[in-house]
Image (cartoon, rainbow, N blue to C red):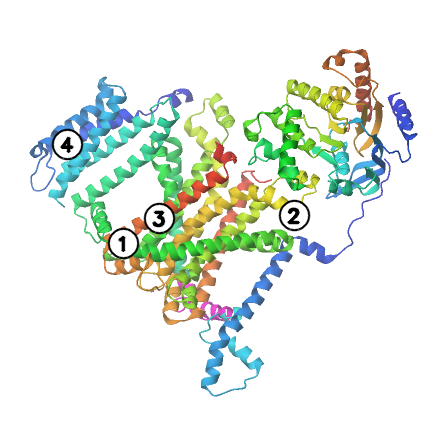
Amino acid sequence: MSTQTVSRSRVDIPALLAWFIVALVVVGLFCPIFRPDFRVMDVPRLSLCLVILAIAAVRYELGFMRNRFGDLMLGVVTAVAAWLLIGTVSNHPGDAALGFWALTVAAWASAWLFVERLASWKSASKTTERLINLVIPALFGLTLLVLWQIIVTGAGIPKVLLPAPSEIWLRLINSVPTLWADFRQTFLKAVLAGYAIGCGSAFLTAILVDRVPFLRRGLLPIGNLVSALPIIGVAPIMVMWFGFDWPSKAAVVIIMTFFPMLVNTVAGLSASDSMQRDLMRTYASGYWQTLVKLRLPMAMPFIFNALKINSTLALIGAIVAEFFGTPTVGMGFRISTEVGRMNVDMVWAEIAVAAVAGSLFYGLVAVIERKVTFWHASVRG
Amino acid sequence: MTTMPLAPTRGPNPFAGLMSGIAGPVIVVVLAILGLWYIAAVTLNTPFQLDTYERADRLDVPFSELLTDTLSQDRPVLPAPHQIAVEIWQTTVEKKITSKRSLVYHSGITLSSTLLGFVIGTLLGIFLAIGIVHSRVLEKSLMPWIIASQTIPILAIAPMIIVVLNAVGVSGLLPKAMISTYLSFFPVAVGMVKGLRSPEIIDMDLMHTYSATRLQAFWKLRLPYAVPFLFTSMKIGMAASLVGAIVGELPTGAIAGLGARLLSGSYYGQTLQIWSALIMAAVLAGSLVALIGVIEKLALKRMGMTR
Amino acid sequence: MTSLAGAKDTEMVEKHTGASPDRVIDIEKLSLTFETGDGPVHALSDIDLKIEQGDFVSFIGPSGCGKTTLLRVIADLEKPTAGKITVNGVSPEEARLNRAYGYVFQAAALYSWRTIASNVALPLEIMRLSRSERQERVARNLELVNLSGFEQKYPWQLSGGMQQRASIARALAVEPDLLLMDEPFGALDEIVRDHLNEQLLQLWAKTSKTVAFVTHSIPEAVFLSTKIVVLCPRPGRIYDVIESDLPRERSLDIRETPEFLRIAHRVREGLKAGHSYED
């Protein structure tokens, strides 16, 4: 067989998925979905919805509604089916049988099929395309949450092992004051203070190092080495030196953020090419003029790279430092104590807060970066 | 050819050569750090020492005695470098490897979960990257999450994984390795996607003119292009993996491993123990990353990618 | 034959020696040797050259002949290892500190985070001129290179030819009497280059500046210059100096005239003879 035919004859994933969904729905309709003997037919709404789902899935193969409206219908039916599955399974926790799992897989497969169709939409306008690129990962996250909910409830996984998203959400909205206090202690005090001092002092050090070539050659290899080390290990020492409250956490954050910022800023300051430096020389430009007008702007992409890396490192540093001792408040403190008490849903709530805080912090830095380095090739697109 | 007056070169100053390279400045900076360390150790340990003298009713202690005493406390605020060196020597060479007090034993525990987690994480990352590069749906739905997940303090999840898995009877190496896997997986996946995408359009077009299959294009073009990226991200992944293993040892109640040494040192104020564990972790991280660096050099040389 | 003619021309120039008030550049027995790992490289050897006020001088030669290096020595971007050089009667370093010249590089080297207007204003900011003075000079010099209306654009929104024009405006904004140009149009296509050459000539006629211009294009050198300096490599040295007798007012059509072709032929012969064909 020639290579050409091999490259042309690809597996038609959508068709495969469609028939797979039909098969699973058939299995689901005729097998018990919950122990001892509960069938889909007992929930007419669900069975009706599943039949429509199967039809919507194979409509391409059967040759009708091959358009965007059909695609959207598939998405809506999938969402309704998932919603009904969640509702039904919450009445029969831990009793899921073969039929139910078949339906769960069918719902997942049709979500995939829907995304597959969405991804192949050729859109004329940029905004729609951007919207699709946002919707697809959002759908993926949603699918993951739904599967998590269905599987945990259906299989009756004990709460201490893995709580369902609904339970985590309940816990989250019921303990807002605690979570807020923890957030203030860890993020607003330790992380922000440490981040500002760490990045700021590293920036000033970088400018000093840049003025003295000897220091640059001596410090840079060491800075590079330190960046690869498990600096987080200084946490117990900082707790010993600066006490249990937030200053010791801020100290850990300072040390963790210092070296990435130093190394990146020094690298950035030497990013200007020789022609641009010659240009400044022909103007008889002084050191500070060249620094402000040429080298700092050139260094901005590097500096923001470090600021982004550090936004994550800072939160990690503060949380882990709290494992070594805190007053009775703080995200790391809460995580370690609630784990000890097996209140896993509270741990997950705290992790959710940390995740949201971390990505918002990162997002904020990224937005400022786009504003400042609008001229850089990676931003102007 | 006319003979030219040669440029006036600088006189043979042996220090000029030494100081203009990298080794000279690095040595000087390291010595400066050590010097500062000693000064800091003396300064930080003096208050406690004066306290001790006062309690012993010794009022005029000569400075030289104060100096030696501050550098040989049992639980100094900041131990001097030579104290840490002695501690490391005693806990590595002079202890049996099987002893619970041997630093080699604890390093071994941490190393094994680091390596196990790293290998699994790297393999997972590579496979996921291959999937993402070849499937539009995977790319569009997974890639934003992989990037977003790097902004999340994943390490916060570590204690829960350990305790929860412990509760269902999974303990020892595996839970820690899972955290390492998790941490090393993301940099490798992101780096590999970038690497597999790094061939220029013109290179891909060349493959197209040969009507190469996707598999052929992968082996002959994408994979070689991705190798430098793989090594770079493996270094990051290895460092992250070690951090994961150390943090994973914290919540198990300080049984074994470098993390446990840090925690128990912090419980009992054993600063020497903390510092020696810290230095050991640093040495471990440094040598693991250096090892990958050596493999990288050999591999790239064999592939003819070094200049 | 050409070498003889070249020698005669050099002699003719030699006659002028003496502190003439309109001498802009005076180079005597100048040499520059780079020390490299493979031994010394004689980038420039025994250069003698005078450039008068109002001259348009082109340096032409194959790559490695030191034409760019010579320009960089004049601009105090390189230090000579032997010989004498004065710019406006003072050392190149003093001339640089006096902002005596404007330098145009092979690439536009505009800062992409600045608009065209503020790129042109960059040297003026460094010279600490007042805001009103800066605005006035920016407007005037952008007008001069036909870039009025593009003040608020960013460099990456402009074509290569426009970018290079902006960089010329930036060099002119310093208001120097001397303009040093290092293959400024080398990266542009021929149609744009012809157009810019014509504009440059008009500019030169309007402002009566002295221009030192590095190029590797024979038609460009002949079209623009009042004096063409042919260099040859290994070691980098002056092979021939050709005084052009073309009228100062020229249009692109002049390239078809026998006068033009005669000068171009002499330049080409010089390049051929000076090239050693070692490679």
User: Which span of residues is magenta-colored?
Assistant: B84-106
Q: Earlier in the sequence, mark 4 or mark 1?
A: 4
Name the residue carrying label 4.
A27
Name the residue carrying label 1.
A347
Q: CA distance from mark 3 to mark 2?
A: 40 Å
Chain identifier of the residue bearing label 3 in the image: A
Confirm or deny contact between disc 3 and disc 4 (CB under 8 A). Answer: no
Q: Nearer the viewer, mark 3 or mark 4?
A: 3
Are dots 2 and 1 on a single chain?
Answer: yes
Chain identifier of the residue bearing label 4 in the image: A
The reply to whether residue B298 is visible in this rendering is no
Neighbor class of circle 2 (other Cα within 10 Å; few <14, some 14-19, many 20+) is few
Q: Nearer the viewer, mark 2 or mark 1?
A: 2
Residue occupying image coordinates x 44% and y 39%? B192
- Residue A149 appears in which quarter of the rendering? top left
What amino acid does circle 3 point to? Ala
